[in-house]
Image (cartoon, rainbow, N blue to C red):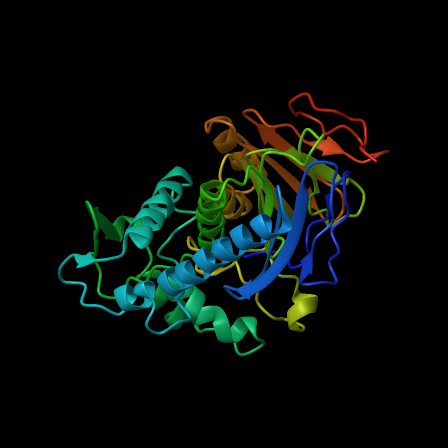
Amino acid sequence: MRWNKILAVILVSASVARASETFQPQTAHQSFVHKKKYVMGTVFEMVAYADSTKHASDAIDQAFGEIVRLDEVMSDYIPDSALSRLNHSSHAVPQPVPPDLYVVIGEALKYSRLSEGKFDVTVGPLVNLWKAAIRGGPTPSAAEQEKARACVGYQKVELFPPDRVQFHSPCVQIDLGAIGKGYALDRAVDVLRSHGISRALLDAGGSTIVAMGAPPDQTGWLVHLRDPSNRIDPQVMLSDNSVSTSEQTPPSLLGPGSAGHIIDPDNGIPVTTSFAVSAVANTGTASDALSTALLLVGPEKGKELVKNVAAVAAIWVSSDGQTRQSSSGPKFLFGRGAPRLANSVQTSSTGLR
């Protein structure tokens, strides 16, 4: 549910060599290593600082291994993943699931409730229905849409601690596409920390970025956010938190008349919006889920939602330069010449360059 271009991250102490699979520059006190891996249908990237390149490289390899493991738990494309087995199991009784799947479903249900169902973890039947149309095929009929919509509703999922999940409808299917990558990054952070890494940047295809600490001699990792207007240049300085961006797939990328990939569970069709939304939160799980939820609820309701969640900020930027933002803590920065946003929390209007 994301835009595809990698977010630009400014590293003052060293530049990341995007062309190589592994980059190992030296700083005055620490080495950093940059690596990439294709998993979960996208390119994950990590930059980590450590006392040696071997230390950083080994830690990143272990963190990538954790993401690969979680793909085999949460993927709905892998036929024998834990999620696929749950979705196709008997729905008559609670089903045991692996700990990670239980936790991430619980997190997804939390954001389903928070957004009053705009973010809905059970949107799977609608996503599957629209897949052919997203690729340029025929639009599903009204009858097909109505049948799929009847299967959607996060209230139809019940958790039984410590590890069982029950569906209260025979056609419910869970889709973790709007939260899974963020959750995987959080678990990768745990792996890096277990290896003594405290300064790192983790990127899931440019859609979710999680920061650990800051580069040496810096206050944070400066991330340029999605700006479909190319006028605003919103930025955020990350340190031990995360940012995610959601945007409907432009029809130009799919062909004339093609449907977008983000489905509104209320009406069962792809959402129509000119906004891209970036959400800042303490974890990748939270920012990933919130960015999708905030795209679906829109800026007016979204601003109120943000104010009611601690340590969260969001910015909506449209293709024609319209902007909205809200924050319960984190602040956005803006490039040189960009206007201060109206009706916003106080933030720096000085561009970092």
User: Which image quadrant for residue 31?
Assistant: top right
The quadrant of the image that shows the C terminus is: top right
Q: Residue at the spot x=36%, y=49% of the render?
A: 104
Furthest residue in direction top, as rendered? 346
What is the x, y in percent for residue 344?
A: 66, 25
Furthest residue in direction right, as rendered? 337
What is the x, y in percent for residue 146?
A: 36, 65
Q: Nearer the viewer, residue 50 or 203?
A: 50
User: Which image quadrant for residue 51?
Assistant: top right
Furthest residue in direction left, as rendered? 93
Q: Is residue 203 visible?
A: no
Q: Is residue 337 left or right of residue 121?
A: right
Q: Nearer the viewer, residue 196 or 75?
A: 196
The quadrant of the image that shows the N terminus is: bottom right
What is the x, y in percent for residue 265?
A: 42, 55
What is the x, y in percent for residue 36?
A: 61, 60
| 276 vs 78: above or below | above
Q: How many marks?
A: 0
Q: Residue at the spot x=51%, y=26% of the render?
A: 307
| 274 vs 197: above or below | below
Q: Residue at the spot x=33%, y=52% of the render?
A: 100
User: Which image quadrant for residue 166?
Assistant: bottom left
Q: Is residue 97 visible?
A: yes
Q: Nearer the viewer, residue 281 or 294?
A: 281
Q: Is residue 90 left or right of residue 296?
A: left
Q: Residue at the spot x=42%, y=53% of the render?
A: 266
